[in-house]
Structure formats: structure tokens, C-alpha cells
Image (spheres, grey):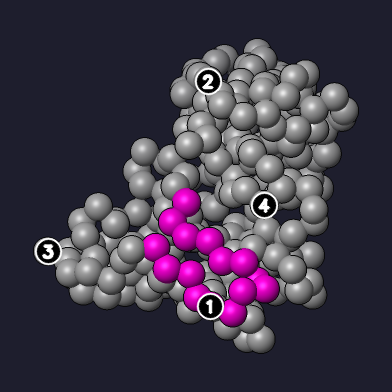
Amino acid sequence: AQTVTQSQPEMSVQEAETVTLSCTYDTSESDYYLFWYKQPPSRQMILVIRQEAYKQQNATENRFSVNFQKAAKSFSLKISDSQLGDAAMYFCAYRLNTGTASKLTFGTGTRLQVTL
Amino acid sequence: GAVVSQHPSWVICKSGTSVKIECRSLDFQATTMFWYRQFPKQSLMLMATSNEGSKATYEQGVEKDKFLINHASLTLSTLTVTSAHPEDSSFYICSASRGVNSPLHFGNGTRLTVT
């Protein structure tokens, strides 16, 4: 079974600074997707960024970028120029590419605080 | 973009009663939807995979007779919590995908409180 581990229950960053959230996963598969979701106090799940395992290039979405290390099974999220609105729970997630719509397996989450 | 609507957003019910939660894909057809449960300060745990026109697939430890799932059309899946108890109080979230390579889109969730 696939597992996703987030070892940082909480992180804090000052506004305008950069922070990196860690995520490791365990799988014996080679074709899968990895995601970072943001969950603000409203509890709406918001997709931040996604990475396809067969792509070596790290995904980037504006201030958000990932460091995908397939061999090490590591998938960290870097948030640059942090803003107050970035404060939320962040979940790393794994999804096997089965050729059909497949489930997401989530990590335990990291609560990010952004301070002035 | 794809939108998933979930209703109600919150509900309070008495112990022993049943509650139905609806999940609709508003602008796309979803043959598969997923139901997650999230306890306070915890992660999302998959409860079951809802398949249009067939029986749902439940995760280990989830009682299928207690959490009834019906996926009668390509745009609607329902989760019914039967004979609810206080320990069923939780945040329930559904999700659906437009297609195989599309990301999952989430509903806004339903906060269930059983008194």
C-alpha cells in the first residue's frame, strides 16, 4: 500500500520569506502523480501544484515550486515570497496512474503559519 | 473550471437518525467519486469509492451498512450516514475527476454533528 509522510506538523515563516515543506512517500509503482493541496480554515481543498512522476522537470506555479526526487521518493514544496494568505494546512498527496480515476492518499499535513 | 457542489454544508442531527449528503459535479460527468472523512486536526481518510451504476468500494474498516453510497447518475453521488452516533461527527468531503488524467476536485465539505 502506498503511504505518504509529512514529518513537519507545523511550520512558520515570515512574510516575504521562503519556506519548504517536506513530503516523502512509499510506493513500488513507477507511474503516479503527486500533489500539494492547501486547506485554509474554510476547509475547502485547493490544489496548489501537481507533478507527474515520469516528468523529471520540477513543477512550478507562480510562487510555488516542488523539488521532486523520484529515487529518494521525496516531494517537497517551496513557497517563495510568503504571503499572509498562504497560512493554511498543506497536504501532500499521491495518486497512482491506473488509467481510470483513482483515489488520492494524503499525508498527515503541515500547518503553515505566516507571521509579519 | 470544474466545480463540485456538496450539500448540506453543515448538519446537526440526533443520535439514531440518518443523514444524507449529496455530491454533484456541476459541469462535467464523473463516473467515479470519492468520499473522505476528516476528523479535527487530522488528515483526509478515504472512506469509499463511488462508482456510477455499480456498488461502491469501501476502504477497510468502513462499515458499508452504516455509510450507504448511491451513485445513480454521472453527476450525483450520495452518502447516507445511517443510525448516526456522536462518534460519526466529522467533516465529510467528496471529490470527483473530470477524467483519467485530470486532478480531483473537491466539494466544500459537510460538517456533521450528531447530538
Q: Chain of mark 4?
A: B
* Residue A53 sits in quarter: bottom right
Quarter occupied by residue A115: bottom left
Same chain letter for marks 2 and 4: yes
Judge whether residue A107 can be spotted in this image. Answer: no
Q: Is A86 drawn above or below residue B22 in the view shown? A: below
Q: Which residue is mark 2?
A: B7
Which residue is painted at 75% across and 19% down in the image?
B73
- Marked residue chain, label 3: A
Residue at x 74%, y 59% (from the top left corner): A97
The relative height of residue B99 versus residue A35 in the rendered view (above or below) is above
Q: CA distance from mark 2 to mark 3?
A: 37 Å
Which chain hosts label 2?
B
Residue B93: assigned label: none
Q: Residues under labels 1 and 2: Cα distance?
A: 39 Å
For numbered disc 4, what is the local secondary structure?
Answer: loop
Q: Is residue B4 left or right of residue B65?
A: left
Which residue lies under the disc numbered 4?
B101
Secondary structure under badge 2? strand
Q: Which residue is mark 3?
A: A116
- Amino acid type, residue under disc 3 in the picture: Leu
Magenta segment, which residues?
A47-61
A7 shown above or below B46: below
The mark lying in front, picked from 4 and 3, is: 4
Q: Which residue is mark 1?
A: A57
Q: CA distance from mark 2 to mark 4?
A: 26 Å
